[in-house]
Image (cartoon, rainbow, N blue to C red):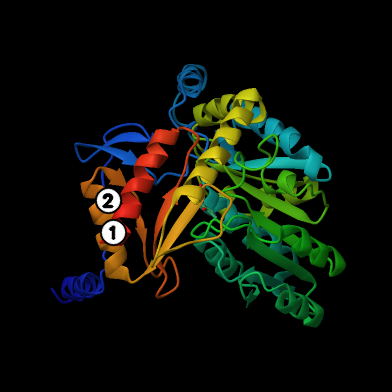
Amino acid sequence: MILLDQLDAGLEQLNAKSLRRRRRTADSACAPRVTVDGNPMLAFCSNDYLGLAAHPNIIAALQQGASLYGVGSGASHLISGHSRAHAILEERLADFMAPHLESARALYFCTGYMANLAVLSGLAAIAANEAEIFSESLNHASLIDGAKLSRARVQVYPHADLIALQAMLEASTAATKIVVTDSVFSMDGELAPIPAILALCEKYHAWLVIDDAHGFGALGEHGRGVLEHFHLRSANLVYMGTLGKAAGVGGAFVAAHASVIDWLVQKARPYIYTTAAPPALAHALLTSLDIIGGAEGHARRVHLQQLIAQLRGDLRLQRWKLMPSDTAIQPIIIGDNAESMRAAASLYEQGIWVPAIRPPTVADGTARLRITLSAAHTHDDVACLLDAVNQLELN
Ligand SMILES: *Cc1c(COP(=O)(O)O)cnc(C)c1O
């Protein structure tokens, strides 16, 4: 029993530090009004920023996709699992992102986690031992893991510190330089200074890999994400967008110059050695893209911005601190792990579901409530949340 005793002791330690994680089970579709473990709740937790996760047209498209293509893809993309649905989706994604990339092509992945592993390990593989990755300190775990998998030399630059990044690039003699950053920091909601980072990458002939998990669909006039938000276009860009957040379905894509994409198809193990996602998902994503890029998507983004303004305008905090974010991610920093857990538990008892985020997901001493808004929320929903939070902090 020695092995199990070790695990039980480890779990006990997590308990003692208020770091033990527990899952809640949702009984209904992802939406502001959900049933969780049998209780009706008002939820502010999902990354379904446009409220598309249960959109009737996308549900219908998924059903149609299953009729057309069946359920499983049956194999990896390079064997026989690459279906017409995947091919059409990749063409649509490339067209969608074309204003921002030279000779754009796109590659669809099962998850964003895998896409990030693939991009970093794949790009580094061109230069064997001569690649160097410059990674922003608040990057998502999948980028950190991708950098490790690449076996390239990795330097972490301090959050948003472009002077430090420039010094690192200046000093580097690596044949392949790769700068990688989240566009919207997932636990802060803040945007990275992408235009200035891109300028540095162009100056030092470095790739800029952007993880736009929280930007794609939500930012930009047409939902093309952070590149559209900042009106950027460059041949140095490798763009990763996820399709399980604002797009409401699942999977992710990398968009970049055709040569980058072809190289990933040849070399990126997280792309090659896995069964292709069900083609019906790719088919459903065509409808999701239509919505994102059309009038409905625009209206949803406008409504989301109004909800963000309402939240920031009407929150009255004394001790806790709202982070400076203009995106749908609106964290309230509480600091202490146990106090954050109590706050989340108290909201939960009132029927409001907001997750508490603790280390190691965020830095020690910065435990927080991570509120996420969705275009599916109403102004009344947000008012209800604000009343509860304003009350809670006074007690
Ligand atoms: C969610 C997320 C990912 C992973 O995407 P999945 O499709 O959920 O695997 C990658 N990067 C960031 C910043 C994310 O928030």
Element type at marker 2?
helix
Where does the image place residue 144, in percent across and percent down from the top left? Answer: 55, 67
Seen at 66% across and 63% down, the residue is: 180
Pointer 1: what residue? 343
| Residue 172 appears left or right of 60 | right
**47 or 337, which is in the foreground?**
337
Where does the image place residue 233, in percent across and percent down from the top left? Answer: 82, 48
Which amino acid, by three-letter code, is at mark 1? Ala
Where does the image place residue 26, in percent across and percent down from the top left? Answer: 28, 39
Seen at 38% across and 47% down, the residue is: 386
Which residue is farthest left?
Answer: 1
Q: Give the quarter of the image for residue 156.
A: bottom right
Within 8 Å of ligand 1, the CB of disc 2? Answer: no
| Residue 29 appears left or right of 114 | left
* Residue 219 in view, yes or no: yes
Figure check: 325 above or below 170: above
Q: Give the quarter of the image for residue 92.
A: top right
Figure check: 122 above or below 89: below
Seen at 64% across and 62% down, the residue is: 181
Q: Residues within 10 Å of mark 2 (few under 14, many from 20)?
A: some
Pointer 2: what residue? 347
Which amino acid, by three-letter code, is at mark 2? Leu
**201 or 6, which is in the foreground?**
201
All told, the count of numbered labels is: 2
The N terminus lies in quadrant = bottom left
Seen at 68% across and 40% down, the residue is: 224
Element type at marker 1?
helix
